[in-house]
């Protein structure tokens, strides 16, 4: 499914992933590594500077409104959220609550 996303859709996915790492208000080294692996996997090396800025400061909330995710991509974004939250082996309460809310909004 990832290979069917346009460049802009892949970049939007990474913007959401970066917002997910900020849910607990801390970007852990494991989360940063996970994001950088996604950059490689999605072929977004040319956008690395922007993605690193999202890791330094979370994307604006209005840019990561889950209700604006196209229906065709919602399961992919949910999987990305789950994978992001698992990436640091520290799945805390705020991440669990966010994931539950995200699932309610997208399903």
Image: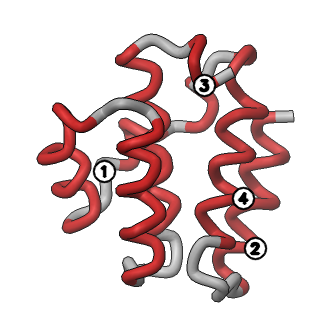
How many numbered tags mark residues here?
4
Residue that label 1 marks? 59
Q: CA distance from mark 1 to mark 2?
A: 20 Å
Mark 1 and mark 4 lie on one chain; the one further toward the N terminus is 1
Please identify the quarter of the rendering in which residue 40 is found. Answer: top left
Determine contact: label 4, label 2, CB under 8 Å.
no
Mark toward the start of the polypeptide (2 vs 3)? 3
Please indicate, yes or no, whether residue 46 appears anywhere in the rendered image: yes
Mark seen at residue 82? 4
* Left or right position of 106 against 92: right
Residue 93 as seen in the image, left or right of residue 20? right
Mark 1 / mark 3, whichever is N-terminal:
3
At horizontal 38% and vertical 39% (from top left) the residue drawn is 62
Mark 4 element type: helix
Q: Earlier in the sequence, mark 3 or mark 4?
A: 3
Q: CA–CA distance between discs 4 and 2? A: 9 Å
Q: Kindly report the distance in space between the C-alpha atoms of the residues bearing marks 1 and 4.
A: 19 Å
């Amino acid at each position: 499914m990832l290979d069917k996303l346009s460049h802009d859709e892949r970049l939007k996915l990474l913007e959401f992933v970066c917002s997910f790492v900020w849910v607990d208000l801390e970007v852990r080294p494991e989360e940063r590594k996970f994001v950088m692996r996604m950059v490689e996997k999605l072929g977004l090396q040319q956008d690395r500077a922007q993605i690193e800025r999202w890791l330094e400061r979370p994307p604006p909330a209005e840019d990561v409104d889950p209700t604006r995710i196209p229906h065709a991509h919602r399961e992919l974004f949910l999987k990305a959220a789950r994978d992001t939250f698992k990436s640091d082996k520290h799945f805390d309460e705020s991440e669990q609550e966010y994931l539950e809310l995200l699932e309610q909004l997208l399903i």
